[in-house]
Amino acid sequence: MPNTTTRAQADVGRYVSDTLRDRYFAACDAVYALGATAVAEGDVETSFGTTHVYRYEPADPAARSRTPVVLVHGSGSCSAMWYPNTPALSAARPVYAIDTPGDPGRSVQRAPLHQPERAAQWLDETLAALDLDRVHLVGASYGGWLTVNQAHRRPDRLASVTLLDPGGLERVGLRFFAWIFASLFATAAPKALRPRLAAWLEQPVLVVPELRAMVRAAVRAHRIRRPAPLPLSDAELSTVRTPLYLVLGKRSLLVHPKRQLERVPRVIPGARAEIITGTGHGPQIDHADEVNRRMLRFMDTVD
């Protein structure tokens, strides 16, 4: 068990109250209802806390034996954010969606795991507890950092990694935080203004009522306690040997897309990278059908 001193406990996410937590869970359930229906959900224990996992299965029995997909969500969210992706992905392969401890969700964090080695240990323990020895790991935003960090530090269980406008490639700049705060303020705008603000900010949260309600409930209910992850250096990225697919939004404010489009395939042997036009930080939401097709095609080539 990692050392959990008083100082370390300050790095553990928490809910403000049980009442606000339950309201947030209700908002999450409304978003889950927009996607595929999970065939099961449950908890697995790790050294860092309890990890809550949702499992989806293809209707085709033959597809259930294919290498599964594991989804790791972004910061400040939970597995419900994958609602545009679970129907298509789970039609082709088994899918597991993980609530990251420390973020709002149904996982329970007991020790900090934002340090790179601890984060990799937590995810490896989670996959082991699920009896998953070979997976296609997909991460968005902060989940993208967790995913590329896993490929760098503990790749043994990974068939491939897919990074969706990920953290971990550059330092998080002020422009990204400004976009986050502007988006949060925009959730309180009058309904008539939200489509215009959604287009201006490239923020689909504003025009999906269930998603907007979930985000607003998370801000009230949960306190995230961790620093932004440091980016991986070229030397660290060059150790990655797992097949890697990078998807960037053309107007991303988290990374510089053209810079990473050139850098990642140059540094990581065999990596492929693509830019999705007409989107910013959420290509898997803004262009779900296209991104789903591209992800599945990539996984098929790996298998």
Image (cartoon, helix red, strand yellow):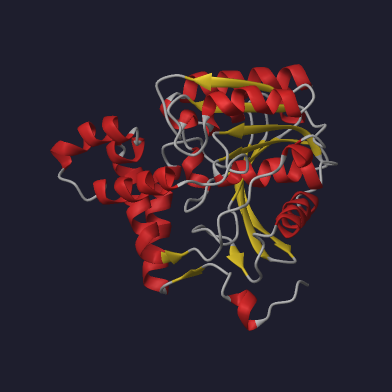
Q: Residue furthest bottom?
A: 6
| Residue at x 71% of width, y 23% of height | 265
Quadrant into which the C terminus falls: top right
Number of labels in the image equals: 0
Q: Residue at x 54, y 34 (%)?
A: 165
Q: Going by the image, does 63 lie left or right of 89?
A: right
* Residue 224 in view of the camera: yes
Q: Is residue 154 left or right of residue 19?
A: right
| Front-most of residues 30 and 17 | 17
In the depicted structure, whether residue 177 falls above or below residue 240: below
Q: Specify the quadrant of the image occupied by residue 191.
A: top left
Query: Left or right of 112: which side holds 29?
Result: left
Residue furthest to the right in view is 156
What residue is rendered at 66% in x and 70% in y?
111
The quadrant the N terminus occupies is: bottom right
In this orientation, does residue 61 appear? no
In the image shown, does 190 or 87 lie closer to the viewer?
Answer: 190
Please provide percent x and percent y for residue 114.
Answer: 64, 59
Q: Nearer the viewer, residue 142 or 206?
A: 142
Name the residue nearer the viewer: 110 or 64. Answer: 110
Tell me the residue at 37%/67% (across/down). Answer: 20
Q: Position of residue 18 (x, y in %)?
A: 42, 73
- Where residue 185 appears, x then y in whole percent? 26, 51
Residue 299, placed above or below residue 168: above
Provide residue 164's location: percent of width, then percent of height.
57, 33
